[in-house]
Amino acid sequence: MVRMMQKVEEFGWESDLARLELGLQQLRDTAVPELPNPNERLCLNPTLNLLELNWSHLCALLHDKKTTIIPKQVKELVLLYKRPGDGAIQIAPATDTELLALKLLSENLDRQAVAKEAGVVVGKVDAAIETACEQGLLLSPPSALVRTNAHFPDAGSEGWQRHLKSDYFTLQWHVTQACDLHCKHCYDRSTISPLTLDQGIIILDQFREFVLEQNVHGQVTFTGGNPLLYAHFEELYQEAANRNFTIAILGNPTTKETIESLQKIQPLSFYQVSLEGLQEHNDSIRGEGHFERIMEFLEILDELSIYSMVMLTLTRENMGQVLELAEILRGKVDLFTF
């Protein structure tokens, strides 16, 4: 009896491996799944097979017969499916995030309710769905944000077609008119009352509903004025992160501690600052010492591994300074644009 149990422990996994191999063979014979039409809903990948095995680590053995990994008698759920597009076969143990996405869709559960019950922000649930779509576990309709050929009559080529739709939508949000600079050419010196935090959260909720309806990922780019001067900026930043939005800032130089605090909430996609030309010309418009503060701030962004951008508004006065400024910025900024 003892020897029989030892044999089960050593070779009992072979039946589970055979089930995996059968699933793999059946998968090879299935058609590549097609994405839903724009007017259809998110759906499960029809090729998906979820196998409950009594042994773990069999996927590694299936991929490499010479592996030194030893199967263990521990239950494991394994996903088998074909990706849309390239039809690549995927076989891997299911993660908790993947199982959450499958459960949400298969049982048609409300995301907000699931998030509340689990004690997490709804962005975690949205991210699980989004990741499952990227992996091909779930099939999402294409972006509904599409420019028609009627607006671009010469856009018939394949190269043009990919520019007619977007999988991202950015809300460039002027959260405050307050600013610590007094640029000569500033177009907005009004004193409009800023939004309350509650109003800001309502806007974020409405934006989330919009991007979900349009089958796109949302980005919030905070600007102003100087967005960091908004009284509730860190709280609003946190609320944007809680909704699975990519976040960026168009602003002025600030302290390393301020940026580190934001990074702990969610890493920035990028931080953009502005220059008007070389130091003398720039400081005559944006104030004495501004050029040097920008150079120092770019070092902070680099130290914190944040993608940096410098924007220049091209004018007759500074157009002759662009190339020299670009050389000064070389190696100090990730993108210089005008």
Image (spheres, rainbow, N blue to C red):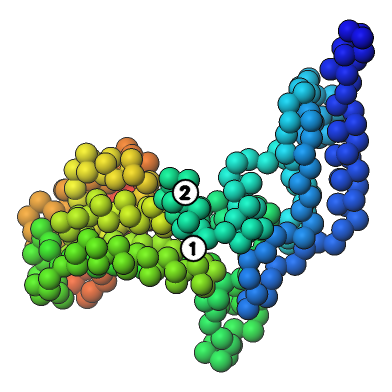
Identify which residue, 308 or 55, lies in the foreground: 55
Residue 110 visible in rendering: yes
Using a 10 Å C-alpha cutoff, classify the residue at mark 2 as few (fewer than 14 neighbours), some (14 to 19) or many (20 or more).
few
The image quarter containing residue 160 is bottom right
| Percent position of residue 179, x then y | 12, 61
Give the side of residue 70 with respect to residue 304, left or right.
right
- What kind of element bears circle 2? helix
| Percent position of residue 140, x then y | 63, 65
Using a 10 Å C-alpha cutoff, classify the residue at mark 1 as few (fewer than 14 neighbours), some (14 to 19) or many (20 or more).
many
Q: Residue at the location (91% across, 56% down)?
A: 29
Which disc, if any, is residue 275?
A: none
How far apart are the alpha carbons under marks 1 and 2?
A: 24 Å
Which residue does the numbered mark 2 point to in the structure image?
117
Which residue does the numbered mark 1 point to in the structure image?
217
| Percent position of residue 7, x then y | 90, 15
Task: Tell me, yes or no, whether the two marked residues, 1 and 2, touch with CB atoms within 8 Å.
Answer: no
| Quadrant in which the C terminus appears | bottom left
Identify which residue, 287 or 233, lies in the foreground: 233
